[in-house]
Image (cartoon, rainbow, N blue to C red):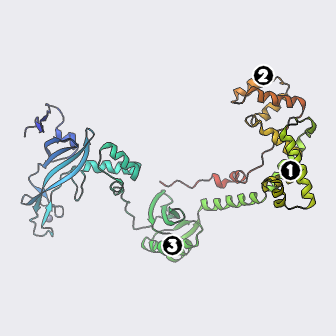
Amino acid sequence: MPRCGHRSAGNVLVMGDGCLSVESVFFPGAAGVRVERVEVLADRTLLQVSSTHLSRSCPDCGLPSRRVHSRYDRRLDDRPVAGQRTVALLTVRRFFCDASTCVRRTFVEQIDGVTEPYQRASTGLRRWLHAIAAELGGRPGARLCRTLSVPAGRMRLLRHLRAPTVADQAPRVLGVDEFAFRRGRRYGTILVDVETHQVVDVLPDRTSETLAAWLRRHAGAQVVCRDRASAYTRAIKEAAPDATQVADRWHLLRNLSLAVEHVCHQHRTCLRKHAEHQQRTQTRQPTLDLLPATLIVDRIRRRHEEISRMVQTGYPISEIARRLGLDRKTVRRYRDTDLDVLLASARDRRNVPLDRFKPYLQAQFAAGCTNATELYQQIREQDFRGGYSTLSRYVRTLRDGTAVPTPNPIPNPRTISDHAPARRAVASPIR
Ligand SMILES: [Zn+2]
């Protein structure tokens, strides 16, 4: 068939002189392939493809053979053309191997860059599927494939992700850790070369026996870095007794961090008392009589009085809560907090968006800038999103001397333990 006339169902694909051949458009980089015919159907494009070689070499002994044993048809999915699914149809030949020393009697020809043994996809499409699976994984990859008219579901994509081969020798410094296939249900063990940060192997569970068996098959680890699980310790002692066992830095730091957090949590009441005490000593006692007698203030006063009285009478918290129709936490808060602090926090609650700016406003006020409009401008520039009336109400309390300085934050156990180096230390990334 002439190069410039690839017929297809009434359409003619014309390739001019000096243009790319049709083979290099469909199978770039392939050798010994001819596209006989391109047929564009309603739902797919068919490519009739053949090999241009007269003889092929035996894959075992390498001897070329021309003697054809038989022919059969192969269908390969190929990369879509113009957004349409594309299928390559080939008639491949089975050759005899005539070498007397070769164990193989016959072999099937492959076209370089187009076919691979036992595959249902062309080499080009296989490269695509591998890239899609590696970048996106199963489900998202399958969704992209639907959009691209590539015939591949989740499982077909995942089959392209082959695990790399595992070396016979264990690395000099081996890292052992567990990981979850499914959190709380099924765990495996991951083995890492600590020096190169490469994953060496993955074991199906986290038992001592499995790790010991792996270590026996893969000798050579001089240092084994592990978490503090006794199963791993036992396996290493048993199967690699000469290796030095090292507790993983990340696990040590994490344990320290958790211990610090636990201690801080136990002392949370002390921390709160300390913060409140500091606040009281810094604050001028707010003149309670100057507070506006709103409903909330009245209610707080009344509740505080009632609860204090009942506590003194000796009622338990649950009984007080039941009688007053309150939550036990609320009763406890009233019991443990002074009235002025309760009132101050009630009043501050109205000014939440302003809280962040209060230290600044207090400093400005002390420095002599007492004009509300001016202060409003200044905090607007610092991203204050509240209204002018919120600010002017607060400035009035500064003027009256009834403003309560922003409460000292009570340190949170998590924040305290964050200051320990542990939480900041991140295990070396595994590539
Ligand atoms: Zn052979």
Residue at coordinates 86% horizontally, 31% vertically from top-left? 398
Residue 137 seen in render? no
Q: CA distance from mark 1 to mark 3?
A: 53 Å
- Disc ID at residue 207: 3
Quarter of the image where the N terminus is located: top left
Looking at the image, the residue that sits furthest to the bottom is 238
Dot 1 amino acid type = Thr
Q: Nearer the viewer, residue 107 or 371?
A: 371
Which callout, 1 or 2, points at the residue further toward the start of the chain?
1
Q: Identify the residue position indicated by label 2 in the image.
A: 374
- Residue 45: x percent and y percent? 20, 43
Dot 3 amino acid type = Thr
- Residue 98: x percent and y percent? 8, 65
- Residue 296: x percent and y percent? 83, 41
Asked if residue 386 is positioned above or below residue 247 in the image, the reply reads above
Side of 286 relative to 238 (left or right): right
